[in-house]
Image (cartoon, rainbow, N blue to C red):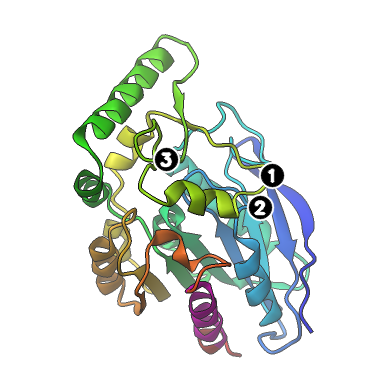
Amino acid sequence: MTTTKHDELTFDSHGTTCAAWHWTGVGSALETEAGRPVVVMAHGFGGTVDSGLEPFAVALAAAGMDVLAFDYRGFGMSEGSPRQRVRVAEQVEDYRAAMRAAGRLPGVDASRLVLWGVSLSGGHVLQAAVGRDDVAAIISLTPLVDGLAAARLAAQHHKPSALLRSTVAGARSKLQAAGGRGPVVIPVVARPGEAGALTLEGCYEDYLSIAGPTWVNEVDADVSFELGSRAAVKAAKELDHHVLVQIADFDRSAPPQAAAKAAFKARAEVRHYPCDHFDVYEGKEWFGPASAHQVSFLTRVLAP
């Protein structure tokens, strides 16, 4: 019998209160005397817990794992200011804080943590796991692991004028922050031809189809500079963990070649899907296979 019920809780991340949802694992298939394994989960670029993560969490909980899904500082239900600002280092710190919180959950085995990430957080989990012997497995779904590769991919799919507009907005935001003023914000997602961080054909409709009530369609425009230096692929070669990398072969947002490179460096198990970035969420054709592969992988590597 599965359950879709979750509890709400908070935890501290470097002085900021972060909000999370917790699902308790069903049954005892993966339980040992030390407890059940626990999955630590967060969204990708601009996402929130209530925006498409629950179906993945419910499937994992039904297989016997606890799941802790959280919002980064400054996003969703979490506290923190400035709002809607992406800082990779801070979000990786939030993952590690969530890992500590997950290890304190009742009935959980703190030595069997699973890190789960999608899109931007698919790179975060590779970084957060480095040097950690309490991480039993990692799932990286349609990961964005290389900022330069992502910039090259964006250049293929966007008009130069759109990229220039985003760069100018990002530079203005940095200047305003340096002068003590508030950031310049742009939409996380917009229709082609409009100002926004993600403006490819279909992205607006796809993102809004999973967006929950706490999601805000805004992001600090300096995100283009922040992600340009993203190099999570470098962390992959430092890992000595069970890793599953799930690649959307026609991904227009997170370069699949960079994901494959990271998977090779991490000696990961790899699954390929003939789809685009958002086609792995519930309601799309490839959610079922992607979710089933996660459950199969984790029940195998976490078996007592």
Q: Quadrant of the N terminus?
A: bottom right
- In this image, 173 relative to 83: left or right? left
Q: Name the residue under label 2.
A: 50
Q: Which residue: 54% across, 70% down?
A: 114
- Magenta stretch bounds: 286-299
Quarter of image, res 87: top left
Quarter of image, res 158: top left
Q: Point out residue 259 in the picture as x, y percentages from the top left corner.
A: 30, 64
Q: Counting residues from the N terminus, which is met first, the one under dot 2 or under dot 1?
A: 2
Quarter of image, res 119: bottom left
Front residue of 66/45: it is: 45
Residue furthest out toward the top: 179
- The three-letter amino acid code for the residue at tag 2 is Asp
Give neighbour class at mark 2: few <14, some 14-19, many 20+ (Cα, 10 Å). many
Q: Point out residue 41 in the picture as x, y percentages from the top left corner.
A: 57, 60
Give neighbour class at mark 3: few <14, some 14-19, many 20+ (Cα, 10 Å). some
Q: Mark 3 points at which residue?
A: 191
Q: Mark 1 points at which residue?
A: 213
